[in-house]
Amino acid sequence: MCGIVGYIGNRSAIEPVIEGLKALEYRGYDSAGISIIDKNNAKLIKTAGRVERLSEELSGLKESYGLAIGHTRWATHGSPTKANAHPHTNSKGNIFVVHNGIIENYQDLKQFLIKKGYRFKSNTDTEVIPQLIDYHLGKTKIFLEAFKQTLRELRGAYAIAAAYQDDPRNVYVAKLSSPLVIGVGKHEHIVASDISALGSDTKKVFYLEDYELAVVSSDSLRIHDYKKSMDITKNPENIQVDSKETSLGDFPHYMLKEIFESPQTVQSAIVGRIKPNENIVKLGGLESVANQLQYIDRIIIVACGTSYYAGLVGEYLIEEVAGIPVEVQLASEFKYRKEPLSRSTVVIAISQSGETADTIAALNKVEDYGILRLGIVNSVGSTIARMTDAGVYCHAGPEKSVASTKAFIAQVTVLAEIALYLSNGNSSLYKPVVNELVNVPTKITEILRQSEKIKKIALKYSKYRDFLFIGRGYMYPCALEGALKLKEVSYIHAEGYAAGEMKHGPLAMIERNFPTLALLPNGNLFEKTISNLEEIHSRKGPIIAIHSQKSRVQMNIEDSIEIPETIEQLQPLLFATVLQLFSYYIAVDKKLDVDKPRNLAKSVTVE
Ligand code: M6R
């Protein structure tokens, strides 16, 4: 989604801002822009295209600029045109603003400003910000005061960076429900909406909290709480960004690279946590709340998209292994739901990015309930990681493809660990799950070795327009996730269903042009799922079965993919890998932008 990068310092500001914007490209955007300022001289350059285009336009500049704010925009209010791209300015063109989030009361503010004689050039909500600053500046004559007053009048979510041509030594930033960080360099600061935009030389960072603004210059930083009207003192935190992990290497796409990282992903999620020889599951991130966890009697998992489906797998796992009732709710629904919540409930938020606005809002909802809030997060230091009381990191490393793959694998692995941890070793499944978790990386590797075969089958089906994914038990959430993956990268209509639901409606769609991908592991639900396949087969629906050696299909189906045997509770880790590869190869065959599907963004920072 939208990205912010700003620079103030003693070298040319253009390079760090353009590099930062490039680092944020994977998150999805449709236009870009930059304002550059140096003593009495300011330029505004925008494009309805890529950051590379901006970079080309800037290459002819002779002067050096010490301040720049840049932005990549993912359109919400107004189409992706040059006029709607950020930075936005006041009518005089001397105040520049980039903004992530949504200003919910922008219509009211716009009407107010229009009545005061202001004219607007874009369809965005953002444009009210520089205009409102201008309005207050006219009264207070002090930019900081005008900025503060503007912030107090904005409703919604925002991360903002602002610059004023008459004050080329300072960048002004603020945040509410949208992340903003300030990287510290030598005689320089870089402000950004994500630490990945700060560059590998930046080792220290300040995280702004809600209702904090900062006045940032090359050598100093003033942080102020504009709700409480008081200055804040805080220390910078260390960051570690491993740039090696984020390069494509020999892979054609991040999605494929990240699928192939799954064995290592599971390994990283279990190392130091699962010790089969000692029969131990150690989750350091939960130690501080271990006592509270003894008394919980209900878990609510909140998440969106793929993380939500991982949560559904977690529901099966925690209920079966730890015997604690679990409910999984879409974060966007949970936050508006009026349900009774007791203090013995734990809310677990699952998020790869740790910045998903709906999931943050769900956690905010229960902030004052005295309820324990845990996180299963991949991005270290992200908003959700910081706002939860405790949690378990996924350690999957950066995930750049919009389609989440290895993060799902890591989330399910962590959920299995949490299930084991909460069982206190009192489950008959404890030992089998602990022992089998360490075998999963090798088994996923065996599946990856079959990628050519999976590709061949995928290509056979790439021209179909509709798909059904079915499974029972642990395979039901996998079916939902498989359908989501196919939809988002190949734009093929796909639905995930519990196999037992076929006769209650979806069977009506089945005919020779409507293939079904059946998830068919060995286990007590095998025969029931086979009966569902018979019903599809007799209606001429093509079937692709993913199965193990012990769950081969005896009827004459179109295609099958055999994968290694594992215990029921960990089957999602193996089956999901096949589904991810299947979707990937179809998308490549359709010549689509696999890593950046249309209309989607990696990190959904608006509700
Ligand atoms: O970063 P999060 O895990 O909170 O993101 C949640 C969803 O937006 C995300 O999983 C989305 O559904 C992916 N594009 C799916 O591949």
Image (spheres, rainbow, N blue to C red):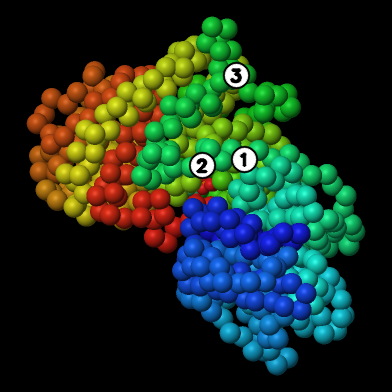
Q: What residue is pinned by disc 1?
A: 241
Q: Describe residue 282's horizontal placement relative to residue 597 as left or right.
A: right
Question: From what the image shows, is residue 358 above or below residue 144?
Answer: above
Q: Mark 2 and mark 1 in contact (Cβ < 8 Å)?
A: yes
Read off the residue under disc 3: 272
On the image, the x and y values in percent for residue 269 come to 54, 27
Residue at 73% across / 91% down in the picture? Answer: 116
**Disc 3 element:** loop
Residue 590 in percent (x, y) is at: 25, 53
Q: Amino acid at mark 3?
A: Gly
Q: Nearer the viewer, residue 374 or 461?
A: 461
- Residue 153 rendering spot, x and y as whole percentages: 75, 73
Given residues 596 and 318, the one toward you in this image is 596
Q: Which residue is mark 2?
A: 246
Measured along the vertical axis of the image, is residue 176 above or below residue 121? Answer: above
Residues under numbered marks 3 and 2 in contact, where contact means CB atoms less than 8 Å apart: no
Badge 2 amino acid: Thr
Disc nearer the start of the sequence (1/2):
1
Quadrant in which residue 352 is drawn: top right
Q: In this rendering, would 334 be left or right of 205?
A: left
Whole-number angstrom distance, CA of label 3 to CA of label 1:
21 Å
Tell me the tag on residue 391: none
Q: Is residue 109 visible?
A: no
Q: Going from the N terminus, do you reach mark 3 or mark 1 first?
A: 1
Q: Nearer the viewer, mark 3 or mark 1?
A: 1
**What residue lies at 26% left-to-right and 22% top-to-bottom?**
548
Left or right, 216 with respect to 79, comes to: right
Amino acid type for the residue under numbered disc 1: Val
